[in-house]
Image (tube, grey):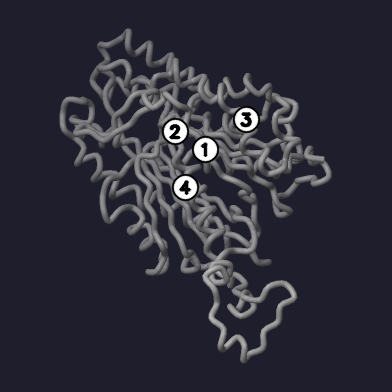
């Protein structure tokens, strides 16, 4: 299917010819075998799929719902503070697997002091595979090949802690081959989506013919709790449920249409920031702290160095080190964890209005879905590239960035392919 080449052809160097007799007696070297196992081209994103649970809650209605279901309507001052937080997110609606009935049936979910982890994980273990399968099935349908052609499966979630995990159930739901190579990522926070795609790039480029299905699925029922403690309000105001899937492969044949080539991938941890954003599983569910005052400016302070470090080694010097005028030549796929993070990035790089429109749109329509969010932004950016009136249509080069605990910054250089409509190659700012 993916243009497999006989070993004897791969073992020949340029201009080198071996007779059948020579090939039958010569043992290949480890270097030759290694070369035969690697893909000939860069990894590319071949298809994207997203999904959300059916329960949609509008943000303007959420404070009333939240304080009603938590039976804390008497905390009027705290409720006003929470309403202000909800408004500041710029999110208009969010999707949840859990409903008001589910929360009424599990009053222990409201209080950090009561054990509830088992019940939360049981709900997530039952629901996450189906939501993940919905997103993955869309990606596979757009890809246009049988699910059994998937060779690798990477699943990330912050909503599970079981073995066998979501990946095994998901493989069964999708009808993947029993030999599919599975990898699970747990508790990588909001950077999980970018980290999963980075891993898929390495798998695709180092395994000839590989087709890697990446699925990120998040359910906030594992972290829902009441407003008795003010520091919990930030997470309750901004997070939602969703699943995103991409298929990654290298050296695509004619019947595949790569959307974005993944040119490079890197990860940076900002020293001394490991306490700014934390998460852990406790008896009362997924818990942690978000210190917004310290967190919000971090990406803006370090983003230009990350961009320079990503682009300069590739010989794309026209993109690196020139400030906003250069960075405006990119298209942008950025995890929109909090609106303030996007604002700081805009200000630090001097980006033109609308450069982060895909991120802001996803934040508005879905909220922060942790690791799944970056895939929604990627799909939104792809959609915008189809629109003739969008300012991004001339951008050939782009960057994907994810942020997570650590404080960790994932950076990927993307290249829009000839299969990405409305890309004017002549407009490249790299000349």
Q: Are marks 1 and 4 in contact (CB under 8 Å)?
A: no
Q: Can you give x and y, in whole percent of width and height, for residue 67 in the image?
A: 30, 20
Instruction: Give me the C-alpha separation between circle 4 and circle 3.
Output: 22 Å
The label number, if any, that marks residue 404 in the structure image: 2
Looking at the image, tell me whether mark 2 or mark 1 is earlier in sequence order.
2
Looking at the image, tell me whether mark 4 or mark 3 is earlier in sequence order.
4
Q: Residues within 10 Å of mark 4 (few under 14, many from 20)?
A: many
Instruction: Give me the C-alpha separation between circle 1 and circle 4.
Output: 10 Å
Q: Dividing the image into 4 quarters, which one contains the N terminus?
A: bottom right
Q: Nearer the viewer, mark 4 or mark 3?
A: 4
Residue under circle 3?
Answer: 356
Q: Can you give x and y, in whole percent of width and height, for residue 342 in the image?
A: 56, 25
Looking at the image, tell me whether mark 1 or mark 4 is earlier in sequence order.
4
Instruction: Give me the C-alpha separation between circle 4 and circle 2.
Output: 13 Å
Residue under circle 4?
Answer: 196
Looking at the image, tell me whether mark 4 or mark 2 is earlier in sequence order.
4
| Residue 278 in the figure: left or right of residue 283 | right
Image: 175 above or below 409: below
**Outermost residue to the bottom:** 21
Image: 282 above or below 66: below
Q: Are marks 2 and 3 in contact (CB under 8 Å)?
A: no
């Amino acid at each position: 299917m993916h243009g497999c080449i006989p070993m004897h052809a791969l073992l020949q160097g340029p201009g080198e010819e071996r007779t059948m007799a020579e090939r039958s007696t010569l043992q290949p070297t480890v270097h030759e075998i290694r070369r035969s196992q690697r893909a000939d081209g860069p990894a590319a994103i071949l298809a994207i799929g997203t999904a959300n649970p059916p329960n949609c809650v509008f943000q303007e209605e959420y404070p009333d719902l939240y304080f009603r279901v938590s039976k804390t309507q008497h905390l009027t001052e705290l409720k006003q503070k929470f309403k202000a937080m909800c408004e500041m997110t710029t999110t208009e609606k969010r999707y949840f697997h859990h409903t008001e009935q589910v929360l009424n049936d599990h009053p222990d979910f409201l209080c950090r002091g009561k054990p509830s982890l088992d019940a939360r994980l049981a709900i997530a273990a039952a629901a996450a595979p189906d939501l993940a399968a919905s997103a993955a099935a869309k990606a596979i349908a757009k890809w246009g090949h049988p699910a059994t052609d998937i060779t690798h499966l990477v699943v990330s979630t912050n909503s599970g802690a079981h073995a066998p995990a979501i990946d095994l159930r998901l493989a069964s739901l999708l009808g993947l081959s029993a030999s599919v190579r599975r990898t699970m990522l747990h508790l990588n926070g909001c950077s999980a989506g970018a980290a999963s795609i980075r891993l898929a790039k390495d798998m695709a480029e180092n395994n000839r013919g590989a087709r890697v299905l990446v699925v990120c699925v998040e359910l906030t029922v594992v972290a829902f709790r009441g407003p008795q403690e003010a520091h919990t309000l930030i997470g309750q105001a901004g997070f939602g449920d969703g699943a995103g899937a991409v298929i990654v492969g290298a050296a695509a044949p004619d019947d595949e249409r790569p959307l974005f080539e993944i040119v490079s991938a890197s990860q940076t941890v900002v020293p001394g920031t490991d306490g700014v954003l934390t998460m852990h599983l406790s008896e009362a569910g997924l818990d942690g702290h978000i210190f917004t005052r310290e967190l919000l400016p971090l990406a803006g302070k370090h983003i230009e160095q990350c961009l320079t470090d990503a682009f300069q080694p590739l010989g794309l010097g026209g993109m690196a080190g020139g400030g906003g005028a250069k960075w405006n030549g990119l298209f942008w796929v950025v995890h929109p964890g909090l609106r303030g993070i996007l604002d700081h990035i805009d200000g630090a790089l001097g980006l033109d209005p609308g450069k982060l429109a895909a991120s802001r749109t996803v934040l508005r329509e879905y909220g922060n879905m942790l690791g799944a969010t970056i895939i929604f932004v990627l799909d939104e950016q792809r959609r915008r590239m189809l629109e003739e009136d969008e300012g991004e249509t001339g951008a050939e080069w782009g960057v994907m960035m994810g942020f997570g605990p650590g404080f960790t910054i994932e950076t990927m250089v993307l290249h829009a392919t000839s299969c990405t409509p409305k890309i004017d190659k002549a407009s490249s700012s790299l000349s």
